[in-house]
Image (cartoon, coloured by chain):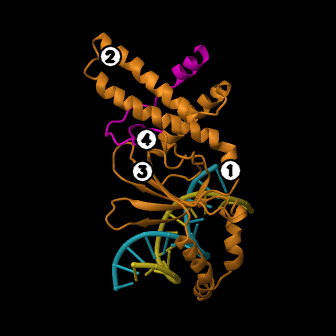
Chain colours: A orange, B yellow, C cyan
Amino acid sequence: MAKRDDYMTSSSGCPNGTHKRLLQDCSSYTQEHTKNRKVRLSTRTEYTYAPYHDGYQWRKYGQKMIRGNSFPRCYYRCTYHQDHGCPATKHVEQTNSQDPPLFRVIYTNEHTCSSIHVSDYMASAIHIQQIADASLRKAEIGISSLTHCGAGHRLIKDEKDAIVSSLFTVINGCDVATLDVGHAAMQENTTARMASSCHEASPSISPVLQPASSDLPMDFVEPLEPQWLEPLDLGWFIEYTQTG
DNA sequence: CTCATTTGACCTCC
DNA sequence: GGAGGTCAAATGAG
């Protein structure tokens, strides 16, 4: 973990005036960073309601109002940036004022730290939740006009089937027998997510990005509908997978 | 006391 | 010179 002391060591006790010199001393480091920016290997943009819970641990290192945006952009880097030299960073911007707000997250560089191995399943669970949210939202739109007839129930079943299909796509390779753990993780993170949605710049203890499944259809990935529903209870999914 | 966040200053790029 | 990105002292929470 990056220690604050790592910075403090080089600048603690810094009298007035010395600070400026120290900043100049680190200019080479900044330049190196700038060079890195030029040879940046990968960037990825995602839209999410849960920008702070992507499976990795991040440390916020800055915030800036961006021209033309109503909301500030927050800058995060991997918690293991210092310890393991992990180059991963992300920028989080709120894109609207809906409840909960939608965020644009720009990921830069891949993680070289090992944190992904600790919590990637958690990220999978979160990703599943997001997919389910988006899918159920679509179902809600259709159901709203069919609530008093059998068609609504059929639609629900159809949507469940669609969600199950998508979930299997996402957790492909996961041991289904561990789903109980996954479900618990999902509920826990849902709670955290709902809490975090109240702040535009909430704590960055978050976690890992499950590599976005590019195989998924975009209408499952992009939660652009203005409506918001309570997080989906996936208990039925657990039951579904256990009973066949 | 430790550690994460905040925030103003500074840097590089265009 | 403006804008975006980063640094690091100050601050606050646990």
In the image, farthest residue toward the front: A215
Earlier along the polypeptide chain: callout 3 or callout 1?
3
Residue topped by disc 2: A152
CA gap between label 1 and label 4 equals: 24 Å
Residue A8, x across and y down, in percent:
68, 73
Q: Secondary structure at mark 3?
A: strand
Number of the label disc, if any, that sits on residue A221:
4
Left or right: A42 with respect to A161? right
User: If the image is split into quadrants, where does the C terminus of chain A sit?
Assistant: top right
* Kind of residue indicated by mark 3: Phe
Q: Are marks 1 and 2 on the same chain?
A: yes
Contact flag, marks 1 and 2 (Cβ < 8 Å): no
Earlier along the polypeptide chain: callout 3 or callout 4?
3
Contact flag, marks 2 and 3 (Cβ < 8 Å): no
Q: Nearer the viewer, mark 2 or mark 3?
A: 2
Instruction: Tell me the residue at 33%/27% (across/down).
Output: A140
Q: Quadrant of residue A84?
A: bottom right
Q: Secondary structure at mark 4?
A: helix
Number of the label disc, if any, that sits on residue A115:
1
- Chain of the residue where label 2 is placed in the rendered structure: A
Location of residue A223 with respect to B10 vertically, above or below: above
Residue topped by disc 3: A103
CA gap between label 3 and label 1 equals: 23 Å
Q: Secondary structure at mark 1?
A: helix
Earlier along the polypeptide chain: callout 2 or callout 4?
2
Q: Nearer the viewer, mark 1 or mark 4?
A: 4
CA gap between label 2 and label 4 equals: 24 Å
Q: Which residues are magenta?
A: A216-244
* Kind of residue indicated by mark 4: Val
Mark 4, Cα crowd under 10 Å, few <14 / some 14-19 / many 20+, is many
| Residue A220 shown in magenta | yes
